[in-house]
Image (tube, helix red, strand yellow):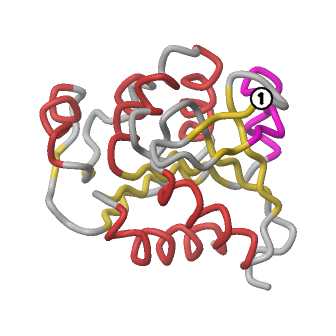
Amino acid sequence: MELTGRKVMIFVEEMYNDYEYIYPYYRLLEAGAEVAVVGPAAGAKYTGKAGTTAVTTLAAAEAKAAEFAGLVIPGGYAPDMMRRHPAMVDLVRQMDAAGKVVAAICHAGWMLASAKILRGRTVTSFFAIRDDLEHAGATWVDQEVVQDGNLITSRTPADLPAFMRAVVAALRG
């Protein structure tokens, strides 16, 4: 399997977009990655917008960026909750600084802005947060997937196939 031996984090918080969590989670498992579900607390249950639940396996404050090859951040309303937790924002910053894959879809761009990693980068997102990302210093484009170095972004659940092809390819290295 193409990602055997690679560890990847996927963030979760209340009101995540169910598709943007479930599709990447199972695609990464299918590729052989070890996936850690990371949130504010370990062993906590979080509910998506459509009612699915996810249980965290690791608290953000306990996660060590050096142990992971990448991070996937789903959208929905969860990124607005995630950015209220300094440990989650710090992990995004650490992963980016280390050149690890940082992948964000839909409203997850809010986490990138809060981590202050957007200046001079080209990204995409759900159109409604375009201004937020541009104010954080990014160049925003309307494409299904945008890769700027280790940073991978997409717009909506409709872009998940292209998003995850890019994520898996980047994790393969």
Q: Residue 51 placed where, x, y %? A: 54, 45
With 160 as the anchor, is 31 left or right in this view? right
Q: Farthest front residue?
A: 51
Q: Is residue 46 or residue 87 the one in the foreground?
A: 46
Q: What residue is drawn where x is 37% and y is 55%?
A: 153
Q: Is residue 94 or residue 59 the one in the foreground?
A: 59
Q: Residue 91 placed where, x, y %? A: 63, 30
Q: Mark 1 points at which residue?
A: 44
Q: Residue 98 placed where, x, y %? A: 63, 41
With 126 as the anchor, is 44 left or right in this view? right
Looking at the rendered structure, the secondary structure element under dot 1 is loop
* Residue 104 to residue 93: above or below: below
Q: What residue is drawn where x is 44% and y is 32%?
A: 79
Name the quadrant containing residue 64: top right
Callout 1 amino acid? Ala
With 142 as the anchor, is 91 left or right in this view? right
Span colored in magenta: 55-67
* Residue 111 to residue 85: above or below: below
Task: Inspect the magenta stretch and tell me whether residue 136 lies in it.
Answer: no
Q: What residue is drawn where x is 15% and y is 56%?
A: 141
Q: What residue is drawn where x is 60% and y is 49%?
A: 52
* Residue 96 to residue 169: above or below: above
Q: Residue 87 placed where, x, y %? A: 65, 19
Image quadrant occupied by the N terminus:
bottom right
Name the quadrant containing residue 173: bottom right
Mark 1 crowdedness (10 Å alpha carbons): few <14, some 14-19, many ≥20: some
State how many labels appear: 1
